[in-house]
Amino acid sequence: MKAILTMLATFLALATVTTAQAHEGHKDDMSDAEMVQMEMHEADAMHEEAADTMHDPESMAQAHPTASGVVERQTPEQALEAAIAENRLTSAGDFLGRLHPIAAHFPVALLLMATLAEILLALRPALGLETTVRFLVAGGAIGALVAALLGWFAAGWRLSDKSQTLELHRWNGSAIVGVAILAAWFAFRTDRRSGLRVTLAILAVALVIQGYLGGEMVFGPNHLGLE
């Protein structure tokens, strides 16, 4: 518990320094409709640019407007260097936010495996999976805390978002942390097995929803094609 509190204090201290900093993908806080509109405009621009390039038999280079409005041709190497430069880190908070997608997978895996292990334990108590469940739940709770804090750096330190998907993802992820910590407490209490199973069931549903919301932000609305 002391280690968790120390980690939380460290991240909050960093947050005070980089409160206004967030990953480029979310810091403008666009609504879902605005995000789709922006992506459509970018796609149209890319199609037009590709069509113009195909009419140039001498080069497949990328068109790039200068400050004066004159269109210059970039070689693929120059375009790559420009993309790398544009994506450079701007702050410590920006770096921490970019770690969120990496960190998010570990608690998902650990907590879902804890749920599966607890189901097996309920069906076959002789398996003696209590220690395994405690390990998975504790690791998942710590991982969820880290992933959620990194997510706040990625999305920006604010309480509301214009994007409904981002807002749901933010608060569902934050709620997962609280429930996961509660599940870890239950896991270390031999007389709280029913409470552990209830919290693990809630976590399993919340994690599936969280994964879907993350997919919506990365791949766009209705990314599973269910609607």
Image (cartoon, rainbow, N blue to C red):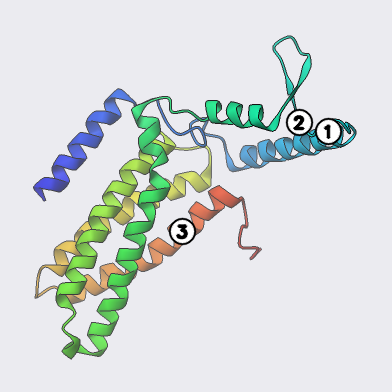
Mark 2 against mark 1, which lies toward the viewer?
Answer: 2
Per the image, the residue denoted by label 2 is: 61
Query: At label 3, which amino acid type do we have?
Result: Gly
Q: What residue is disc 3 on?
A: 211
Where residue 179 appears, as percent x and y from the top left, is: 26, 59
Q: Whole-percent x and y of residue 9? A: 18, 36
Answer with mark 2 or mark 1, whichever residue precedes in sequence: 1
Q: Is residue 51 left or right of residue 143?
A: right
The amino acid pointed to by label 1 is: Thr
Disc 2 on helix, strand or loop? loop
Q: Is residue 223 above or below residue 66?
A: below
Q: How many numbered callouts?
A: 3
The amino acid sitting under disc 2 is: Ala
Q: Position of residue 100 (x, y in %)?
A: 39, 45
Q: CA distance from mark 2 to mark 1?
A: 7 Å
> How far is mark 3 from mark 2, CA to CA?
38 Å
Alpha-carbon neighbours of circle 2 within 10 Å: few (<14), some, or many (≥20)? Answer: some
Give the SS element for disc 3.
helix
User: Which mark is in front, 1 or 3?
Assistant: 1
